[in-house]
Image: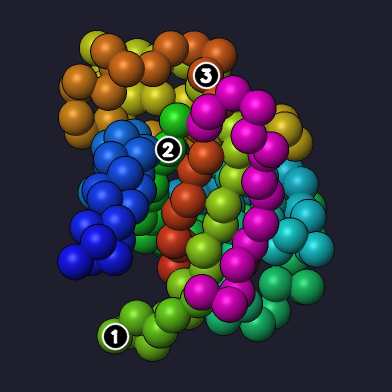
Amino acid sequence: MKRETTMLTAFAVVAAFALPSWAQVKQFPTETITIAGTIESIDYNRRAMQVKTADGKMVAVNVPESVQRFSEFKVGNNLQATYNNNVLVRLKPPGEPPVDTIDEAYSKEQTSGTKVMVRRMTASIVALDKGASSATFEAPNGWKYSRRVVDPTVFDKVKVGDKVDIIWNTDLTVSVK
């Protein structure tokens, strides 16, 4: 009986500490985005690129392994890309080390057969626009990522300068012209 009570108490303590951290993770709904623009920079090792759209915005695009001719992409190429993003954001506790990974081990196949890449990165919140319901994050490499915020209460919990861990799954269809 004493062992069962001890185990139950240990479980309750672990659960009590874990629940607040679960509440800090926010999942955004899957968003399908189509962009057209010019490749401005390419990081072949990280399979990432910056694309400048016709309206002058810079868009960070992560390219999964399923895009087999990525090594043939060049700065200056025009492209059209359609991708689905599923994003999780977690407020990072002070002192926790930053992360920056592309995790192929957790890649999965969608029903469409498109390979999905999982990316984890620590970033800073650089802009919050409650009126437009969007947040902009900047990674240590200087790349910026903006996202629509569905839950308006998020704006009450974060501020510009906060560090967050962003975890997102991306599947991508791309054509280079």
| Gap between marks 3 and 2 measured at Cα | 11 Å
Q: Residue 12 in the image: x percent, y percent?
A: 25, 48
User: Residue at the location (75% across, 36% down)?
Assistant: 141
Marker disc for residue 162: 3
Query: Who comes first in sequence, dot 3 or dot 2?
Result: 2
Q: Nearer the viewer, residue 94 or 167?
A: 94
Q: Which residue is mark 2?
A: 90
Q: Nearer the viewer, residue 134 or 73?
A: 134
Name the secondary structure under disc 3: loop
Labelled pair 3, 1 in contact (Cβ < 8 Å):
no
Tell me the quadrant of the picture where the N terminus can be found.
bottom left
Using a 10 Å C-alpha cutoff, classify the residue at mark 2 as few (fewer than 14 neighbours), some (14 to 19) or many (20 or more).
Answer: some
| Gap between marks 3 and 1 measured at Cα | 36 Å
Which is in the foreground here, disc 2 or disc 1? 2
The image quadrant of residue 126 is: top right
- Residue 122 seen in render: yes
Marker disc for residue 111: 1
User: Residue at the location (50% across, 76% down)?
Assistant: 107
The image quadrant of residue 96 is: top right
Labelled pair 2, 1 in contact (Cβ < 8 Å):
no
User: Residue at the location (53% across, 28% down)?
Assistant: 93
